[in-house]
Amino acid sequence: MSSLVETPLALPNLTIVGIETIPIRVPLDRVYRGSHYQMTHRSTIITKVMTASGITGVAYAGDEDAGLLEINEIINKEIGPLLIGEDAFAVEKCWEITRPATWNILRDRRLGLVATACLDVAIWDAIGQALNTPLWKLWGGYRREVPVITIGGYYAEDANIEKEVTSLVEAQFAGMKFKVGGLSPEEDIKRVEQARRVAGPDFALAVDANQGWTPQEAIRFSQLAQDLNLMWFEEPCQWQNDRRAMREVRSRGTIPICAGQSEFSAAGCRDLMEIGSIDFCNFDSSWSGGPTEWRRAAAMATTFDVKMAHHEEAHVSAHLLASIPHGTFVEFFHPQRDPIWHNLIANAPALKDGKMQLSDRPGLGWELDEDYINKYRI
């Protein structure tokens, strides 16, 4: 009687032997204004994690312009050296090793979180390469195609809503996230009504107040919008008591509520879900420590019947949202608002019928344009 002996799978040696970063900063063509903020540049840090097998995980994460160089320093001086000699396959351990970057109470905690995310994404890219598997499949493989919305409706003197929305429909976006919260509910509803008229009934239209209104104002806007078939109302209320405030808007208004991008942790997302504040969780993996933490929030969301979205960062969010059954829309900006996504990634897939199709290339699968990096590196 013969016996079969299984031969263990020989995996590449992913011992981390080096880390390299390249911060880049790109000026925007104009100032982009939301309810209470404005953007003049788009920035990121390209992070490379080199391993003993020769596999290098490469990623970029975050759009923190003001803290760009500090994040870069945290990676190179505080947490990157701690990872040298560690096995990248031990992703949970690597994530835990970087955690002290968030413990300095005198420093903006998000700087340490973005630094952690830069390394976490690059480590996952190395793992995907080692297993010859794309991350969307490694993380769950629920779908290959994901619908895409863009972000617009910014406040500007020369804003032309009809022209903007028409161009998005023609570009085959599945929908858009429209900025509100910078005017009164009565003024902003007119802008959104115009967008809906131009887009038509099948265009997925969400609104984002960026924490711009009081609960009373947000409820009033939601009631005024009851016939507009809005997909979600994102961060409707000012930050100081927003979990309870959003719960009120959700219960008294007419639009599903979306939040999560301002949370630092999966535990913060849990609290939003547990208190009944949200229908959609748009947790940002780059602002919260990376895909490792995002996936924890996504797992909890299944127990609360909450759908997952992701704040921007399409190069990572496409893989995350495609991997799970309750993922929703990938979102990215117009090329002038996010020139990095549209120019840094040389093989970004084109939209077709409102969707992006992911490839079978291992890891993240993106090819970065070295000329673009060299042009805008700091």
Image: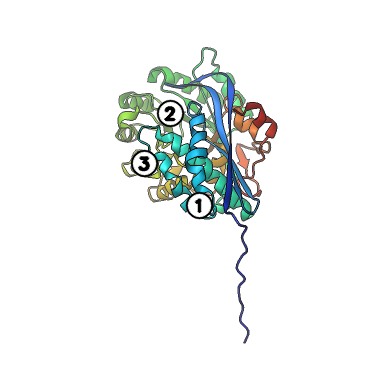
Marks 2 and 1 sit apart, C-alpha to C-alpha, by: 47 Å
View extreme (top): residue: 157
Q: In this view, does 17 lie above or below 229?
A: below
Marks 3 and 1 sit apart, C-alpha to C-alpha, by: 22 Å
Residue at (44, 49) in percent of width and height: 96
Which disc number belongs to residue 32?
none
Marks 3 and 2 in Cβ contact (< 8 Å): no
Side of 231 where 123 appears, left or right: right
Marks 2 and 1 in Cβ contact (< 8 Å): no
Q: Which of marks 3 and 1 is in front?
A: 1
Q: Quadrant of residue 283?
A: top left
| x and y, in percent, of residue 21 in the image | 58, 37
Q: In this view, does 212 lie above or below 290?
A: above
Q: In this view, does 179 lie above or below 118?
A: above
Residue at (30, 25) in percent of width and height: 216
Residue at (47, 40) in percent of width and height: 78
Which disc number belongs to residue 268?
3
Mark 2 residue crowding within 10 angstroms, few (<14) / some (14–19) / many (20+): few
First reached walking from the N terminus: tag 3 or tag 2: 2
View extreme (bottom): residue: 1
Which disc number belongs to residue 91?
1
Q: Is residue 281 visible?
A: yes
Mark 1 residue crowding within 10 angstroms, few (<14) / some (14–19) / many (20+): some
Q: For the C terminus, give its image quadrant.
A: top right
Residue at (38, 40) in percent of width and height: 103
Q: Can residue 327 be seen in this view?
A: no
Marks 3 and 2 sit apart, C-alpha to C-alpha, by: 32 Å
- Mark 2 is on which residue type? Asp
Q: For the N terminus, give its image quadrant.
A: bottom right
Label 3 SS? helix
Q: In which quarter of the image is residue 130?
A: bottom right
First reached walking from the N terminus: tag 3 or tag 1: 1
